[in-house]
């Protein structure tokens, strides 16, 4: 196990994640989306972004193990997406990542480009876009005001649901790492696993609702750019339906 001592830094020896290490990778990625496609940027900013994203994940800590895991997972996912977006997409990512083929390309470094860039960065499945994985989810035909109200109500409902699940999780020794999963009854094992999965899904959905509200209020996005993040549970009749349509 000598190799692990050389390559894996113990958690108590990790450097604290400062604002520079935390903000530099997403700002570099955002700058790539805000600028026009450029071979020069792909040879300079993109490698710099990939390096800092992958370097800060195992060698810096926020002080929280779950936060470090989530940050590292997100960084790795965004690195893969960046490689696909800026190196593999043909034609250029501006043409590949559009809502519809006849949509105009937002002007570089504009406010509308910022909203478009954030949408591309956070829509990992591309739901509602020409590049979407499953052509299932469309935009909303509601007016801007009605959709804002719907997203606001949904955000409150999701938050209350997450609060209920979090309250349960805080009462269980397993979630405080005081009891291994194998020591629990089968029933509690199932409930705990469902709770953990539900909490993750609810948290992701809450962030999405807030993002939609902000971008709709600021008019960065149109209502048809705010499809539901998840599909209907009616499609989750089997594993393929759950992963391909519901999730």
Image (cartoon, helix red, strand yellow):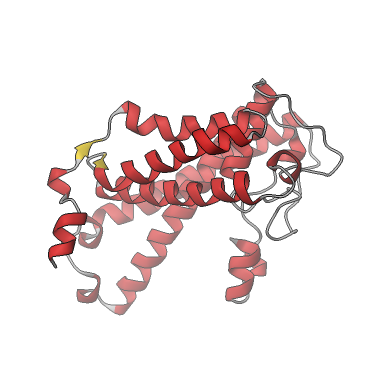
Residue 80 percent across, percent down from the top left: 51, 52
Between residues 144 and 240, which one lies in front from this camera angle? 240
Q: Residue furthest right?
A: 102
Residue drawn 72% across the image and 39% down it: 225
Quadrant (top left, top right, bottom left, bottom right) of the N terminus: bottom left
Viewer-proximal residue among 145 and 42? 42
**Residue 173's quadrant in the figure?**
bottom left
Rendered view: 17 above or below 139: above
User: Looking at the image, which is closer to me, 46 or 221?
Assistant: 46
Numbered label tally = 0
Residue at 28% from the left image edge and 48% from the top image edge: 58
Q: Looking at the picture, does residue 34 appear above or below residue 86?
A: above
* Quarter placement of the C terminus: bottom right
Above or below for 169 versus 54: below
Regarding residue 156, the answer to whether it shows in the image is: no
The residue at 25%/49% (across/down) is 65
Counting from the top left corner in percent of width and height, residue 138 is at 76, 50
Q: In which quarter of the image is residue 237?
A: bottom right
In the image, taking residue 185 as reference, residue 73 lies left or right, namely right
| Vertical position of residue 64 compared to residue 232: above or below | above
Q: Is residue 200 left or right of residue 148?
A: left
Q: Is residue 89 visible?
A: yes
Q: In which quarter of the image is residue 231?
A: bottom right
Q: Give left or right: position of 2 versus 144.
A: left
Residue 40 in the image: state x and y as whole percent.
59, 32
Q: Where is residue 84 in the image (x, y as percent from the top left)?
A: 59, 51
């Amino acid at each position: 196990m000598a190799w692990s001592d050389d390559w894996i830094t113990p958690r108590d020896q990790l450097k604290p994640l400062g604002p520079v290490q935390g903000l530099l990778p997403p700002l570099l990625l955002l700058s790539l989306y805000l600028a026009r496609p450029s071979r020069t940027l792909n040879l300079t900013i993109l490698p710099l972004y990939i390096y800092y994203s992958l370097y800060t994940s195992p060698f810096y800590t926020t002080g929280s193990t779950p936060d470090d895991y989530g940050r590292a997972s997100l960084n790795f996912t965004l690195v893969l997406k960046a490689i696909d977006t800026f190196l593999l997409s043909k034609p250029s990512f501006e043409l590949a990542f559009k809502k519809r083929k006849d949509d105009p390309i937002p002007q570089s470094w504009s406010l509308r480009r910022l909203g478009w860039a954030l949408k591309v960065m956070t829509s990992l499945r591309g739901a509602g876009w020409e590049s979407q994985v499953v052509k299932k989810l469309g935009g909303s035909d509601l007016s801007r005001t009605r959709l804002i109200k719907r997203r606001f109500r949904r955000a409150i409902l999701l938050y209350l649901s997450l609060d209920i699940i979090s309250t349960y999780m805080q009462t269980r020794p397993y979630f405080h790492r005081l009891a291994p999963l194998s020591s629990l009854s089968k029933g509690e094992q199932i409930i705990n696993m469902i709770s953990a999965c539900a909490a993750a899904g609810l948290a992701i959905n809450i962030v999405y609702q807030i993002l939609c509200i902000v971008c709709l209020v600021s008019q960065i996005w149109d209502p048809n750019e705010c499809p539901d993040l998840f599909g209907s549970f009616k499609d989750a009749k089997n594993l393929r339906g759950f992963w391909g349509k519901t999730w």
